Amino acid sequence: MREVVPARKGAARDSVSSLVDDLFAGDKRAAAKLISLIEDDEPEATEALARIFPHTGRAHVVGFTGPPGVGKSSLINRLVRRYRSRDRKVGVVAVDPTSPYTGGAVLGDRIRMADTGVDPGVFIRSMATRGHAGGLALATFDAVRVLDALGMDIVFVETVGAGQSEVEIATRAHTTVVVEMPMTGDAVQTMKAGILEIGDVYVVNKSDLGSEDVLVANLKFQLTARDGWTPPVIRTAATEGRGIDELADALDRHAAYLDQTGFRAKREVARARLEILENAQRLLSRRVANRSRLGRAFDALAEDVAARRLDPHAAARKLLEPTRPRGK
Amino acid sequence: MIPIAKKIRVLIAKPGLDGHDRGAKVVARALRDAGMEVIYTGLRQTPEDIVEAAIQEDVDAIGLSCLSGAHMTLFPEVVKLLKKRKSGDILVAGGGIIPEEDVPKLKKAGIKVVFGPGTPLRDIVAFFETAGKGA
Ligand SMILES: Nc1nc2c(ncn2[C@@H]2O[C@H](COP(=O)(O)OP(=O)(O)OP(=O)(O)O)[C@@H](O)[C@H]2O)c(=O)[nH]1
Ligand SMILES: [Mg+2]
């Protein structure tokens, strides 16, 4: 196991507050350093995020999920160019898996996104999952916030898309795109649990390979309206650039739908509930590990449970009871 | 579950026009196996592309691989552009088919280390490990 290494030179040199100032001024280097602080869970990250948060909420966030190699990066690459041609600033956070054995990762999504080069209106960040399940990294949506504050109009998030639980992306993004391709087994297999519920837009990519009709028909047949929105099914060939306009139109239509129906605001509240709960859980785990009052209470409760004086459910309730004022 | 800790991030890039990236991929995998996060950007990158990617990815170091013979212009250009972008702290290593007599010139131009064709992977890994520790 590798030891914890001291802070990077670059990170140590810049104060957090000057990084945040630079971020607000549109500096990409500052954005990149702030994302690293968040990823590495540095103590200053909390302070930085607190300052960044009021400046977020402008960017439309689009999540992409789908099996490995289906063409997520290639589609995003095309969409980046298309939104740039309309002068919209575009951010991308592309997640790839961390090796559970070595903790390392090869992050290769940029290979397919090389077209954008040095365009000042584009920011692409590759991110490893670092042990987080669900196709995302713990830091993914805080990184999205940094890009939001950097002034990006739209942010694409590419998930690992490895398997069963890609539900998390749908709870975080404004629009979730599920990408499938023809000839990945039979059409029924692609309808794995939950996949028909999470998408706002469905894409059948690699339509240049043919035989996509069955899959398209199957998806259309099974997708039904939810809250007044029927997810469209778009055929694309990312490598040739076919269907990209239709896909972008679908994304824009979904964004307009969210605004017109008030669902954007509702999604924000749902997401806030989730995030508060997650943070509360993390905070609790951290606090009971401390030598704080709560940590000592936790240790005592553990002794009680081990000695069968208390059951774990009752101990949990006791742990969460509001602490009484001292001296009582 | 892998504990969150500072990870060493490295960009492996192929400037120039040659289309051979087997060596670059082998190095990328070795660095991954040593626990690093390796951003691989693919073939035919300009120095501008590479520096832009390195900044956005906030890497500790860049590994450049060039087999086309254009290393004497491409490698120093990367170092120069990094400095221009306030990112001179990102270390640059070079590899590929590089004649012995070019090595001192490259080092003078700010390339930290040059790996010839026979360099053991272990040495390459060791370099990037120290780069990540701010050495
Ligand atoms: N024929 C064909 N190939 C495509 C198409 N879109 C992508 N590809 C190819 O499919 C491969 C994978 O594409 P990516 O864009 O990297 O797919 P991805 O879903 O991002 O892959 P991961 O990030 O590894 O999960 C590449 O070789 C692409 O060139 C398409 O529309 N048609
Ligand atoms: Mg990809």
Image (cartoon, rainbow, N blue to C red):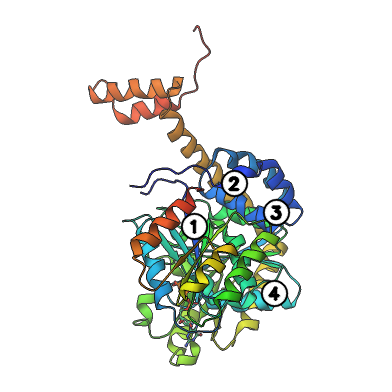
Co-location on one chain, circles 3 and 4? yes
Element at label 1: strand
Q: Earlier in the sequence, mark 3 or mark 2?
A: 2
Please name whichever residue, B48 or A85, is drawn nearer the observer in this view of the structure.
B48
Q: Nearer the viewer, mark 3 or mark 2?
A: 2
In whole angstroms, how far apart are the C-alphas of marks 1 and 4?
Answer: 29 Å
Instruction: Judge the density around disc 2: few (<14), some (14-19), many (≥20) Cα neighbours within 10 Å.
Output: some
Element at label 3: helix
In whole angstroms, how far apart are the C-alphas of marks 3 and 4?
Answer: 18 Å
- Whether residue A212 is visible, yes or no, is yes
What amino acid does circle 4 point to? Tyr
Which residue carries the number 1 mark? B9
Element at label 2: helix
User: Which residue sits furthest top?
Assistant: A327
Which residue carries the number 2 mark? A11
Co-location on one chain, circles 3 and 2? yes
Which residue carries the number 3 mark? A149
Q: At 51% across and 48% down in the image, what residue appears?
A: B134
Q: At 35% across and 26% down in the image, what residue appears?
A: A315
Q: At 46% across and 88% down in the image, what residue appears?
A: A212
- Give percent across and percent down for residue A246: 63, 82
- Give percent across and percent down for residue B135: 50, 48
- Give percent across and percent down for residue B65: 48, 73
Mark 3 C-beta to ligand 2 under 8 Å: no
